[in-house]
């Protein structure tokens, strides 16, 4: 069934007016649901729109948390990454976790700098340190 308008152009029965902001489905006229200035199809409007709130990374717990702290310390780049992910989060737990990653990253960097300087100085004053065990004093 087609409707003819004055100028003789043929119009489709339904105009496409938008796409669903969640699933991308093309919405025709009278099919769209507008909420918060976004378009939704009738399926996606049923999904509770709590996505932004729920999109929280859950900070690791227990042994994994310790593990992440250790990695943050030994690999400042990873520490920075974790900090950057968790620190901007709203929840206090996430923020604290990100903050600790940043702090450990800082300590890690300082630690490496100190190690670097110490061994540079040892190297300069002693000369050959090939017998020295690097791994022993790692605490
Ligand atoms: Zn949809």
Image (tube, grey):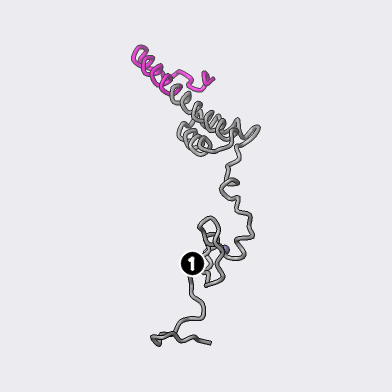
112 to the left or right of 50: left
- Residue 63 position (above or below residue 55): above
Location of ligand 1 given as a quarter of the image? bottom right
In-front residue for pair 95/52? 52
What residue is at 46 percent from the left and 31 percent from the top?
Answer: 76
Can residue 77 be found in the magenta stretch? no
> Between residues 64 and 16, which one lies in front from this camera angle?
16
Secondary structure under the numbered disc 1 in the rendered image: strand
Q: Residues within 10 Å of mark 1 (few under 14, many from 20)?
A: some
Q: Residue 43 appears in which quarter of the rendering?
A: bottom right
Task: Kindly give the residue lying farthest to the top in the view shown.
Answer: 125
Tell whether 134 sits left or right of 33.
Answer: left
**In the image, which residues are magenta?**
111-139
Q: How many marks?
A: 1
- The residue where tag 1 is placed is 18
Q: Position of residue 134 (x, y in %)?
A: 48, 21
Query: Relative to 108, is 126 above or below?
Result: above
Residue situated in front as seen by the camera: 126 or 80: 80
Q: Position of residue 128 (x, y in %)?
A: 38, 17
Q: Which residue is painted at 48% across and 69% down in the image?
A: 17
Q: Quadrant of the C terminus?
A: top right
Residue at 36% from the left image edge and 18% from the top image edge: 120
* Direction left: furthest residue: 124
Q: Position of residue 107 (x, y in %)?
A: 48, 23
Could you say where residue 7 lies in the image, as x and y percent from the top left?
38, 85
Say if 98 sits above or below 4 in the image.
above
User: Image height check: is 96 above or below 120?
Assistant: below
The residue depicted at 58 percent of the width and 43 percent of the height is: 56
Q: Residue furthest front?
A: 6
């Amino acid at each position: 069934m087609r409707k003819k308008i004055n100028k003789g152009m043929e119009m489709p029965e339904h105009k496409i007016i938008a796409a669903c902001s969640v699933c991308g489905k093309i919405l025709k006229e009278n099919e769209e649901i507008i909420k918060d200035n976004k378009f939704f199809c009738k399926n996606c409007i049923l999904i509770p729109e709590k996505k932004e709130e729920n999109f929280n990374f859950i900070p690791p717990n227990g042994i994994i948390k310790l593990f992440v702290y250790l990695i943050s310390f030994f690999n400042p780049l990873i520490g920075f990454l974790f900090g950057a992910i968790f620190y901007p989060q709203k929840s206090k737990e996430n923020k604290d976790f990100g903050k600790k990653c940043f702090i450990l990253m800082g300590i890690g960097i300082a630690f490496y700098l100190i190690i670097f300087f110490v061994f540079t100085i040892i190297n300069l004053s002693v000369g050959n340190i090939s017998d020295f065990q690097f791994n022993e004093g790692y605490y």
